[in-house]
Amino acid sequence: APASAAKTAIMPHTTSVPVKGHTNPQSIEDMAGAWKDFQFAPIRESQVSRAMTRRYFADLDKYAESDIVIIGAGSCGLSTAYCLAKARPDLKIAIIEAGVAPGGGAWLGGQLFSAMIMRKPADAFLRELGVEFEDDGPDANFVIVKHAALFTSTVLSKVLQFPNVKLFNATAVEDLITRTDGKGGIRVAGVVTNWTLVTMHHDDQSCMDPNTINAPLIVSTTGHDGPFGAFSVKRLVSMQAIPSLGGMRGLDMNTAEDAIVKGTREICPGLIVGGMELSEVDGANRMGPTFGAMALSGVKAAEEALKVFEQ
Ligand code: AHZ
C-alpha cells in the first residue's frame, strides 16, 4: 500500500462532541483564570467501565484472528511493529507484552544512564522516526539520543497510533499454537496467552486455562534468557522443533550487532525471531548498551514478514 495511506491512517481525533449544558472549553487557554467555576463534564462510573471493557473485548474478538502477532514490545518488537504497520495498513497486527509498561530494556541506555547509543547506520531509523540525536563528529561511529526514553516513547507512540495495531500489555505468551506440516515438522500458527498476573500464579492457584490468538505468522522478540525472555525459542526446543539453543555468549559489540541483524529470520515455519532472543538460538554475543541492532533487527524482521505475506 502507498505510504500516504499509512500517513492518513495515523491522524488522531482532536475534537470531541460538546456536552449539553456545560461550558465546553475547547483549549487550555479557554480554561485559564476560570478555575473558580471549573467542573468536569458529569459521569456515571458504569460509563467508564463500559467504555473500557467494550473496546477491550471487541479487540479480543477482532484480534483472535490476527495476521501477525509480535511477542514482546521491547526495542526490537516495537521497531518491527512500526515498519510492518507502516508498510501494510491492511494487516491486523497484535503485540503481546508481558509487562504493564511496553519498552523492555530500552527506557535507559545502559546501567542506569539516560542516553542511548546507536551505531551507524542505525541513525537512519532515528531519522525515519524523527528522533533527534547528537553526533560526536567524523570520528564517532555512533550517534547519541539524549534520552533512551525519547527513542522508546517515540517509537511506541507512533506504533500505537496505527489503526491496524493492538497492544495487549500485561499479557504473557504462555505457549505457541502449532500444526503438523505433514512431513514430521511443525508450523507455528498462533499464540497461547494469559494475563501476566495469572501466568505468574499457575503454581499456587488451581488450573487457570489460557486464551488463544490464531495468526499465520509470529514475530518473537522476547529478549535474551530470563524469567520471561527467550520464550519462544526455549519452547521450540522443548517441543523438539529445533534440537538445542546455542546460548547467548559474552559481550562483543562489533560481533554481536552485525550477527543479530543479519541473523534475523524465520527460524521455524511461521516464527520469525529478532532482537536478543536470537542470540540464544545462534549462540551470538551480546552487545550490551548499544541499540542499533535492535532497531535494524526490527527492520529486517518486518522485511522477512512481508516476504511471507507476499509469497
Ligand atoms: O517483557 C518483555 C520485554 O518487554 C517481553 N516478553 C518476554 N517474554 C514474553 C512473553 N510474552 C509476552 N512470553 C514477553 N512478552 O519482551 C520484551 C523484550 O524486550 P527486551 O528489551 O528484553 O528485548 P530486545 O531484544 O527488544 O532488546 C534487547 C536489548 C539489549 S539486551 C543487551 C545485552 O544484554 O547485552 N543489549 C541490548 C541492546
Image (cartoon, rainbow, N blue to C red):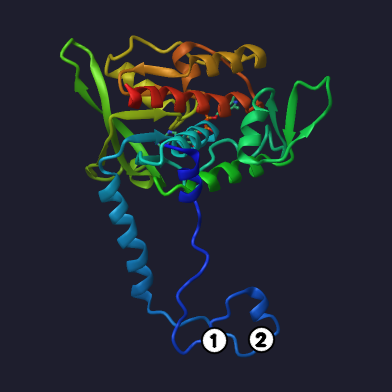
Q: Earlier in the sequence, mark 2 or mark 1?
A: 1
Q: Which SS class for mark 1?
A: loop
- Identify whether 289 is placed above or below 44: above
Of the 4 image quadrants, the one containing the N terminus is: top left
* Contact flag, marks 2 and 1 (Cβ < 8 Å): yes
Q: Which residue is mark 2?
A: 34
- Whether residue 206 appears in this view of the structure is yes
Residue in view at x 66 percent, y 39 percent = 148
Residue in view at x 68 percent, y 76 percent = 29
Image mark for residue 23: 1
Name the amino acid, label 1: Thr
Residue in view at x 50 percent, y 23 percent = 300
Q: Position of residue 134 (x, y in %)?
A: 78, 35
- Whether residue 275 appears in this view of the structure is no
- Identify whether 274 is placed above or below 96: above
Asked where in the image residue 190 lies, by quadrant, the reply is: top left
Asked where in the image residue 182 lies, by quadrant, the reply is: top left
Q: Nearer the viewer, residue 281 or 305?
A: 305
